[in-house]
Amino acid sequence: MSRNHIAVIGAGSWGTALSMVLADNNHNVMLYSKEKKHVEEINEQRTNKDFLPGITIPEKIVATNNVEEALNGTDIVLLVVPTKAIRSVCQQIKNIISKPITIIHASKGIEPGSFKRISEMIVEEVPQNLLGDVVVLSGPSHAEEVSLQQPTTVTSASSNMDAAAMVQRLFMNNYFRVYTNPDVIGVELGGAIKNIIALGAGVSHGLGYGDNAKAALITRGLAEIKRLGAAMGAKKQTFSGLTGVGDLIVTCTSVHSRNFRAGKLIGQGRNFEEVENELGMVVEGIRTTEAAYHLAKSLHVEMPITDAIYNVLFNGKDPKEAVDDLMIRVGKDEANS
Ligand SMILES: NC(=O)C1=CN([C@@H]2O[C@H](COP(=O)(O)OP(=O)(O)OC[C@H]3O[C@@H](n4cnc5c(N)ncnc54)[C@H](O)[C@@H]3O)[C@@H](O)[C@H]2O)C=CC1
Ligand SMILES: O=C(CO)COP(=O)(O)O
């Protein structure tokens, strides 16, 4: 594939790891961080110790804390910031660009209040005359493993399959395999909601429960993701793929997961504000729980695990009591629930 110049906005663990994939594929990467100290560290020491300790960053990646410089000469931008920063980053971008750009995003969340998915926020913030295609890159992929070039599979989703295929070509190599999918709603929902279930898996672990409970959370979590997906117009089969069951498995079982680690501490009695500060990285499942809880209520979709996590996070419910209450819900028929 021909060499591209790509602006990556967000130099946390995932933005840095994805920049490394692009650099390995011989693309030129301008990596934007809002923190000057991270820019200096990346450019001078070739490390990003706060987010990816022990990793050497290739010379092909140039960091900057000037968005204008990052965007200069590119028509492809990759957004990898926390969901709550998506709108402000889009506003910065639209004030700089003068021709249409393709926006790829690799963030996972839903906005509380508006219930918007990330691609919807992008479309709302960037005027039509400046926005080319919007593509979602999502799937079971922890930055810590991708930065070590460990085999990883993800999905590139867009309503324009040519754009999804362009992104597939951009990222694909011998350790990073990319599938395409036209179901943007399903791909975005799966990636966002699995973080709630991963928080739950962490809480369960923190309470001292074992693999049976984790398997139950993954399986019944998938059932409630599918119910919400059906109400929102997603394709059911998407949730059996990488961005559904695949991402649930990796996030609920990996030591790398920020959501699992946060849940574990919450299960041990800590509150979510303390835990987020302690981890020093975004725990998307917290805000997404708030969003999904209210979204599900507004659509009359039953999401008992999401309800339980919401009550633990926002209503001070005891985690053990939340699990007990889930277990003694009225008996159901598995095929119809
Ligand atoms: N870490 C991972 O392995 C993966 C993360 N993701 C998703 O990627 C997104 C980012 O996650 P991480 O990189 O893990 O987060 P992180 O906490 O490691 O880094 C977030 C980065 O965003 C920057 N940032 C925050 N607000 C900003 C703003 N207004 N403007 C510009 N930059 C801003 C921070 O300075 C930091 O560099 C999340 O939605 C996450 O769910 C998706 C797949 C894998
Ligand atoms: O989305 C991810 C892996 O696919 C990252 O999950 P965490 O944010 O929980 O680390």
Image (tube, helix red, strand yellow):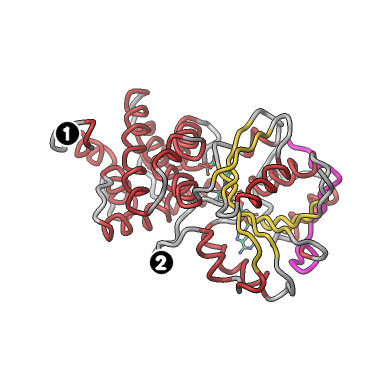
Q: Is residue 69 magenta?
A: yes
Identified by mark 2, the residue type is Ser
- Of 272 and 73, nearer the camera is 73
User: Callout 2: helix, strand or loop?
Assistant: loop
Q: Is residue 68 above or below residue 239?
A: below
Magenta segment boundaries in residue numbering: 54-70
- Answer with mark 1 or mark 2, whichever residue precedes in sequence: 2
Q: Quadrant of residue 10?
A: bottom right
- Estimate the x, y position of residue 258 in percent, counting from the top left: 51, 42
Question: Which residue appears farthest toward the top when viewing the image?
Answer: 211
Residue 152 falls left or right of residue 32: left
Give the CA separation, mark 1 to mark 2: 32 Å
Q: Quadrant of residue 195?
A: top left
> Residue at the location (67% across, 35% down)?
146
* Residue of label 1: 332
- Estimate the x, y position of residue 332 in percent, counting from the top left: 16, 34
> Residue at the location (63% across, 60% down)?
133
Identified by mark 1, the residue type is Lys
- Of 232 and 112, nearer the camera is 232
> Residue at the location (49% across, 33% down)?
246
Residue 216 falls left or right of residue 95: left
- From the image, which quarter does the C terminus lie in? top left
Residue 86 falls left or right of residue 96: left
> Residue at the location (64% across, 32% down)?
145
Q: Is residue 149 above or below residue 25?
A: above
Q: Which mark is residue 102?
A: none
* Residue of label 2: 114
User: Callout 1: helix, strand or loop?
Assistant: loop
Q: Is residue 7 magenta?
A: no
- Check disc 1: other Cα within 10 Å, few if <14, some if 14-19, many if 20+: few
- Estimate the x, y position of residue 107 in percent, counting from the top left: 56, 52
